[in-house]
Image (cartoon, helix red, strand yellow):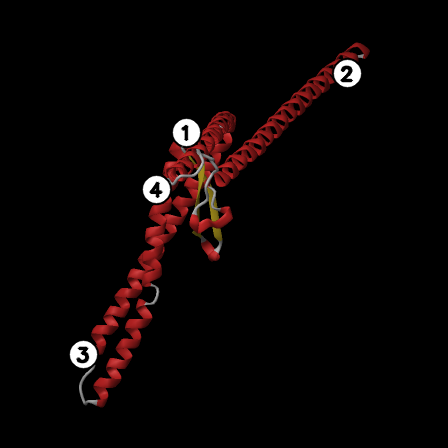
Amino acid sequence: MHTQDLTYTSHGGMHNRVPVIVGADVKAVTAASEALFEAHVAFVAINRERAAAQGDPVRYAEDARLAAAEAGQKGGDAGEAKKLKKKARAAEERLGDLDLDWEVAIANLQAKRFAYASAVEHHAPALAAEARTAADAAVLSLASAAGIARKAETQLSGSLAILAALGHVRAGGEFAPVPPTARSGGMGGAPGLYVAEAQSNLNTAIGYATEILDDLKADEKAAAQAAKAEAEGDDDSLDDLGDEDEDDEVEA
């Protein structure tokens, strides 16, 4: 579960960026996302074609003018120039059609964007639950990766040290295992250092992710309590209003 940005330029050169949820299990959101992606693909295609055709009318018109001037210099007629002028008119008409196709495509894209936003808003609770489950699973995966890295670092450093020490033994030296370093890395060429660093970074990421999840959970709880308090306040106001109405009837 992640987001993918869709970008496009609409009327007046306005730049738009839409973060679209990908991989959600909420069917309505997935359907809205897919419809938005399809509309974006269609818009990009017509936008590219329209942009490529923008200069055709002017280009053919200029070619027609130059052809006419050249024909006049050579004592010929305007036959070729008129053909190019027809191309210019055809290009102008084609550009007009592409403008209309562009309007259809941008309107469809905007409609699909609003439908997607509505689906996300309507299914926000289900999406939040799914996102939290995915985040929890990712944290567990990182913890597993950190554990694997820790074991691998011990295995890697130890086995390389033993292998290097055995080489000294074969050469008549003592068996004194010391983790070797790569020739190209100098003093910093010990593989274990980088595995340990990766493990440390994973643990840091886990800590930050857990903190963020806890903070978001606290925010959700606070929002729910605030909504409950507001609802109870509205109920009390209605009860007070009802009591006032009863008092008025008694006095009458």
Location of mark 3 (residue): 79
Which badge, 1 or 3, is on the more N-terminal residue?
Answer: 1
Q: Amino acid at mark 1?
A: Ala
Q: CA distance from mark 2 to mark 1?
A: 46 Å
For the C terminus, the quadrant is: top right
Which badge, 4 or 3, is on the more N-terminal residue?
Answer: 4
Q: CA distance from mark 4 to mark 2?
A: 58 Å
Which badge, 4 or 1, is on the more N-terminal residue?
Answer: 1
Closest to the observer, 231 or 38: 38
Closest to the observer, 229 or 166: 166
Location of mark 4 (residue): 38
Label 1 residue SS = helix
Location of mark 1 (residue): 28
**Badge 2 density bin: few <14, some 14–19, many ≥20, Cα 10 Å:** few
**Badge 1 density bin: few <14, some 14–19, many ≥20, Cα 10 Å:** some
Q: CA distance from mark 1 to mark 3?
A: 60 Å
Which badge, 2 or 1, is on the more N-terminal residue?
Answer: 1
Q: Locate residue 217, reporting x and y percent.
A: 60, 26
Q: CA distance from mark 4 to mark 3?
A: 46 Å
Q: CA distance from mark 2 to mark 3?
A: 93 Å
Q: Locate residue 12, reporting x and y percent.
A: 48, 57
Compared across the picture, whether 34 is left or right of 149 comes to: left
Closest to the observer, 40 or 166: 166
Labels 4 & 3 near each other (Cβ < 8 A): no
Compared across the picture, whether 86 is left or right of 149 comes to: left
Q: Is residue 176 above or below residue 140?
A: below
Location of mark 2 (residue): 244
